[in-house]
């Protein structure tokens, strides 16, 4: 075992290195390790969220409302954009380096003393497991009342699914992503996500795709979960403002209630509505309608149609359905000048389909392509080829993100708009670049 790790940076490096010496563990061994740690945070009220798109946003809406109501809450999400500490949020704030290191050492103690069964199995937490266990350790330390837990990949076999006692489950929009692990069809993918359900526990989901709804309802019946669909008719009166959106959601005890989102992202209407429906089902008397409305209004989630500079928007859409939702939002906002898109993605996404959607949308005067860092990056030549067959816009390829970003920002006219999309890795690199440069917001 490595020598003692006593700095945040060293702990982060160790976790980043784990994929090199460990692989996927069985759910049995993952659950056994959680038990070995003493089941941290198992007595908190756990809200478990799975889905293809919108998981992190739903988590953010839930936690902001809890904070608004004065209720203690811990949130575990992934991935992070700049620092691992973003994955652990308590009372609306990412944890300190000291707390990160504390949780790291608790988990490492378990790694060093795993017990005979796990030792014989050669068990070591995977990258994601390590972070999940750290999150639960931190939530235990701060005695949070509610834990908002986002799955990493899928649901049925996700490390977070070792939690048996849940207050409620939420399934967000189901789409095509990670098909090599989850299945080739929407019903197959939905079945993996539905694996988070538990007996007598409400499960909230958007009732918008018949084949997905059918799978969810079948799994709910099989597991004994309580299906709570969010019907299309539950959301109405959507009004797009300049940089906000007004809408109404049907609450069973109050009829339709009006809400305001502090974002131009249309896709957040559904995500916020799922959170509202979930919070209603909790029946927590501290969450009044005014607190619910104010919490939804105050919610901010990085990298989701985020205006990082005047008329420069960063969006984390990183799969086909996410790109469709992004384009739908852009379409609803008129631009008096020129629109430019900065795009990149990773090699295991459906980049040809995404390129076709973006190119045929006719929304952008110029499309700029940049390479990402890391092993998963799509080679720049392939990225350029995916857009090469389409016309109707200028296309430019840059060797680095910094070169592209600085040029686009410095040459942008007052009425022009710049959009950055394609990968959460790209979003993270842009955030880091923005932090390290002297560009004024």
Image (cartoon, rainbow, N blue to C red):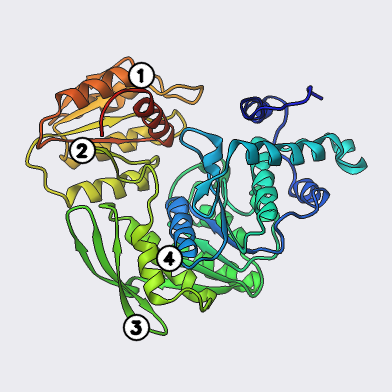
**Residue at the spot x=49%, y=26% of the render?**
376
**Residue at the spot x=44%, y=28% of the render?**
347
Label 1 vs label 2, nearer the camera = 2
For residue 310, which numbered disc appears in the image? 2
Label 4 vs label 2, nearer the camera = 2
Q: Are marks 1 and 3 in contact (CB under 8 Å)?
A: no
Q: Tell me where residue 346 sits by quadrant.
A: top left
- Graded by Cα atoms within 10 Å as few (under 14), some (14 to 19) or many (20 or more), the crowding at tag 1 reads some
**Image x and y of residue 344, in percent:** 35, 29
Q: State which quarter of the image contains the N terminus.
A: top right
> Mark 4 or mark 2: which comes first in sequence?
4
Label 2 vs label 3, nearer the camera = 2
Q: Tell me where residue 405 sits by quadrant.
A: top left
Q: Is residue 157 visible?
A: no
How far apart are labels 1 and 2 at the CA level? 28 Å
For residue 380, which numbered disc appears in the image? 1
**Residue at the spot x=37%, y=42% of the render?**
303
For residue 30, which numbered disc appears in the image? none
Label 4 vs label 1, nearer the camera = 4
How far apart are labels 4 and 1 at the CA level? 38 Å
How far apart are labels 1 and 3 at the CA level? 52 Å
**Image x and y of residue 171, in percent:** 50, 61
| Secondary structure type for disc 4 | helix
> Mark 4 or mark 1: which comes first in sequence?
4
Q: State which quarter of the image contains the C terminus.
A: top left
Residue pointed to by mark 3: 255
């Amino acid at each position: 075992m490595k020598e003692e790790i006593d700095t945040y940076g060293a702990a982060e490096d160790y976790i980043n290195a784990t994929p090199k010496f460990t692989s996927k563990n069985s759910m049995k061994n993952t659950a056994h390790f959680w038990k070995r740690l003493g089941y941290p945070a198992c007595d908190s009220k756990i809200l478990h969220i799975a889905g293809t798109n919108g998981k992190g946003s739903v988590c953010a809406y839930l936690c902001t409302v809890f904070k608004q109501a004065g209720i203690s809450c811990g949130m575990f999400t992934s991935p992070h954009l700049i620092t691992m500490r973003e994955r652990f949020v308590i009372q609306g704030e990412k944890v300190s380096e000291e707390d990160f290191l504390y949780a790291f050492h608790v988990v490492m103690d378990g790694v060093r003393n795993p017990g005979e069964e796990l030792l014989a199995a050669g068990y070591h937490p995977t990258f994601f497991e390590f972070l999940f266990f750290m999150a639960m350790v931190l939530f235990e330390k701060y005695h949070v009342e509610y834990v908002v837990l986002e799955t990493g990949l899928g649901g049925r076999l996700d490390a977070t699914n070792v939690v048996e006692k849940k207050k409620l489950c939420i399934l967000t929009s189901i789409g095509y992503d990670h098909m090599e692990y989850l299945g080739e069809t929407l019903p197959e993918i939905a079945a993996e996500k539905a694996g988070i359900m538990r007996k007598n526990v409400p499960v909230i989901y958007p009732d918008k795709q018949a084949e997905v709804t059918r799978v969810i309802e079948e799994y709910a019946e099989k597991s004994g979960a309580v299906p709570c669909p969010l019907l299309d008719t539950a959301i109405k009166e959507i009004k797009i403002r300049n940089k906000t959106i007004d809408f109404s959601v049907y609450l069973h005890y109050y009829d339709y209630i009006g809400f305001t989102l502090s974002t131009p992202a249309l896709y957040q209407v559904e995500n916020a509505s799922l959170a509202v429906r979930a919070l209603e089902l909790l029946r927590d008397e501290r969450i009044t309608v005014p607190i619910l409305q104010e919490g939804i209004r105050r919610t901010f989630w990085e990298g989701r149609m985020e205006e990082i500079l005047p008329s420069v928007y960063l969006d984390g859409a990183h799969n086909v359905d996410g790109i469709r939702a992004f384009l739908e939002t852009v379409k609803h906002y008129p631009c008096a000048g020129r629109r430019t898109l900065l795009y990149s993605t990773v090699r295991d996404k459906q980049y040809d389909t995404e390129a076709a959607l973006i190119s045929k949308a006719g929304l952008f005067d110029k499309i700029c392509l940049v390479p990402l860092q890391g092993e998963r990056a799509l080679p720049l030549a392939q990225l350029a080829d995916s857009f090469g067959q389409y016309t109707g816009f200028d296309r430019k390829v840059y060797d680095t993100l910094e070169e592209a970003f600085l040029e686009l920002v410095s040459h942008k006219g007052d009425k022009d708009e710049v959009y950055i999309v394609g990968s959460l890795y790209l979003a993270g690199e842009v955030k880091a670049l923005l932090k390290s440069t002297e560009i004024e917001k």
